[in-house]
Amino acid sequence: MSEQQSCRRRPGAGLLPLMAASAALALYALRLRPRLLTWGAAHDETARAYPGDELFTDADSTSTMATTLPAPPEKVWPWLVQMGYDRAGWYSWDLLDHYGEPSADHIAPEWQHLEEGQRLKTTRDGQSWFTVARLEPNRTLVLRSDLRLPSGHSFDPQWDVLPQARVNGIWGFYLLPTADGETRLVVRTRGQSRPRPLTRPFDLLLWEPAHFIMQARQFHNLRTRVGAEA
């Protein structure tokens, strides 16, 4: 009997790749994904409420990640307040979120002013931005993003008609002092996207893993910069 004939006699053989893919997806959803969404954060840090949560009370996606930085909050704050495409950058993978330009490795006085309602550009053409939604010096910085899909251009939810396809969310930074003079930096994302049947697979397979990769890199780079200044 030839190999080709043998394969024809195994009606379930074609299901093996599907079963393997299903098992891998289940492993990711049940074991890996929860760890990615709460990387570095203690239970009390993920369970508590933060300023900005109220902007999306019925959020359909959220994550809470955290790290310890070797300086008190007042030394960390200047690094956060100067973020922005045309400011200090984002301290993450610059090739992916800053057109390859290195993020600043110093605190620049000209970038230290920030206020609620201010826009921080995320692209060269200025068609996409974060809006400062909540700000408490040395404690809280919440950036809000409202994007049309599929263009990825920003819109103003207060004045513009809501697009049928969109993603709205926050990127919140919370500085918590520790007993030994360091800072727990907790970063929470929270948001909504529509139409959900189309955006849900995108969240699971692309956005959430991408956020983990970028946020972990930002933690590393902030730790390096803050430590050098300490």
Image (cartoon, rainbow, N blue to C red):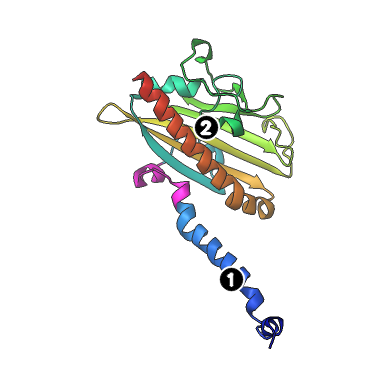
Regarding residue 21, the answer to whether it shows in the image is yes
Separation of residues labelled 1 and 2 (CA atoms): 36 Å
Does residue 18 lie above or below 158 as drawn?
A: below
From this viewpoint, which residue is outermost toward the left? 180
Q: Residue at x 74, y 36 (%)?
A: 161
Q: Residue at x 49, y 37 (%)?
A: 215
Does residue 87 lie above or below 166 as drawn?
A: above
Q: Amino acid at mark 2?
A: Ser
Mark 1 residue crowding within 10 angstroms, few (<14) / some (14–19) / many (20+):
few
Q: Which residue is mark 1?
A: 19
Q: Amino acid at mark 1?
A: Met
Q: Earlier in the sequence, mark 1 or mark 2?
A: 1
The part of the chain drawn in magenta is: 35-48
Residue 224 falls inside the magenta stretch: no
Residue 47 falls inside the magenta stretch: yes
How many tags in the picture? 2
Q: Position of residue 188 (x, y in %)?
A: 48, 39
For numbered disc 2, what is the local secondary structure?
Answer: loop
Mark 2 residue crowding within 10 angstroms, few (<14) / some (14–19) / many (20+):
many
Q: Position of residue 219 (x, y in %)?
A: 44, 34
Q: Position of residue 167 (x, y in %)?
A: 65, 41
The answer to whether residue 225 is left or right of residue 181 is right
| Residue 13: quarter of image | bottom right
Does residue 60 lie above or below 14 as drawn?
A: above
Position of the N terminus, as image quadrant, is: bottom right
Q: Which residue is mark 2?
A: 92
Position of the C terminus, as image quadrant, is: top left
For this rendering, which residue is in front, 38 or 103? 103
